[in-house]
Amino acid sequence: MKLKKLFAGVLTASMILNGGMTVSFAKKKSVSKITLNKKKVKLKKGKKFTLKLKGTKKSAKASVSNKKIIKLSAVKKSKKKVKNQWIVKALKAGKAKITVKAGKHKYVCKVTVLDINKAMNSHTSSTVSASQDSDVANNAIAAINGLPSAEYLTLNDEGRVQQAQNSYDSLTANQKQYVDTETVTKLNNCINKMNELKQQQAQQQVIESANTNTKLFFTDTIKSVDMMPGDTEKLSYSLSSSYYHDSDVKFTSSNSQVATVDSSGTVTGVGKGTAIITVAVGSLSDQYTVNVHDISITFPQLPKSLNDFSISERQIKCEIDSLSIEKHFYEPNEFSVRLNYTGKKLYDSTNSNDYCRIDYKLYNENNVVVDSGSIFSNNVNAGESFSGYTYLGSTLPEGSYRLELFDGQ
């Protein structure tokens, strides 16, 4: 096919160049197309039109699908039927199909009959209905716009929100078309906020009921403790509740520079002063007072060797390995201190099973001796260790102290 076109083009160009020869081609004979003059028609009730089959001389037959909707009759001229032409008359509203058969071929025309009176009445009814829908929708819109913004709602607005929701929910689909998106969004926000407020109220009522039936208190009737920095004290409490559990109980300190408290209720002294420890669950709480006293005692460098000359016939050499203190018998700003010690008997000239004696003096910040005494071991042989304790003073005020050890006399 491409070669034929190429040959024809070359031939034509050659003829033009060699003398302007004109080449003419025979036109294809046109074939008439068989068709109906109308394939789809709308008629008012009582009106007519003429249906024609064009493009053929053969006689055709026409039939109608519903004779109650349209009437089909042949066109006549001088009382003779005109070939392939029919008069179509609209009888009543509806749809029908006209089929024209010519030889083996069929041609179809679709006819729709309109009742103009019903259409006008329907339009009028639709207009009235639209006006009514708009009025009903406006009532719902007014109820919604009358609500405050969601963030300003209170439980007192529950009735108004419910009324606005009912007004909108009662609208038909057509009526809801008159409500703008912004108004619908406001209604949804108000409904969500009101549900949130009601849930909070219900939860609060549960908590209030739980608090009414809950008991929480520190078991210590005095509810007060004296301690030193670094000391710890476990506070005991009692919880009786069907709603709360121990994991819900919280401890807090009024002053963490004085005392801290962990989740189990263990208090640790930090610095001089008074702190209030609170145990709480729900709206219930109880308090405990912690007094932290500032007292410190410095010791000589250990281990320290000392002589015991209390018995002239013998010499004893002793060593102190460790010293520590415990604070006891607290009174307001006064307390007693227990001194714990460990040591070893290094030498005994008589090799007797006898005790060691070491003297001490306790100095205050002004370098004044406020207490003195002796440390005694239990009966031990040379090379054996010993331990014991003694109390430093009956009561001591807060402050810093220094302990010194001396040979026993």
Image (cartoon, rainbow, N blue to C red):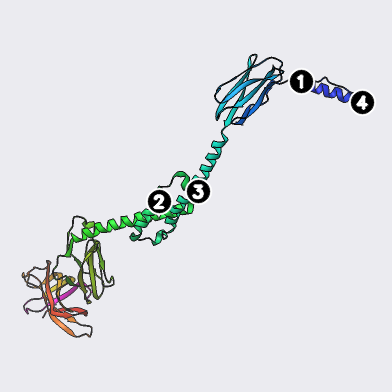
**Of callouts 1 and 2, the N-terminal one:** 1
Residue wearing tag 3: 131
x and y, in percent, of residue 295 in the image: 21, 77
Judged from the image, the secondary structure of the residue bearing numbered disc 3 is: helix
- Which label belongs to residue 30? 1
Q: Looking at numbered disc 2 in the image, what kind of residue is underneath it?
A: Ser
x and y, in percent, of residue 311 in the image: 6, 78
Q: Between residue 85 and residue 350, name the one nearer to us.
A: 85
**Of callouts 3 and 4, the N-terminal one:** 4
Query: On screen, 288 above or below 55?
Result: below
Q: Answer with the quarter of the image where residue 29 lies.
A: top right
Residue wearing tag 4: 20
Query: On screen, 279 above or below 298?
Result: above
- Residue 21 lies left or right of residue 135; in this view the side is right
Q: Between residue 236 and residue 307, name the one nearer to us.
A: 236
Confirm or deny contact between disc 3 and disc 4 (CB under 8 A).
no
Residue 309 shown in magenta: yes
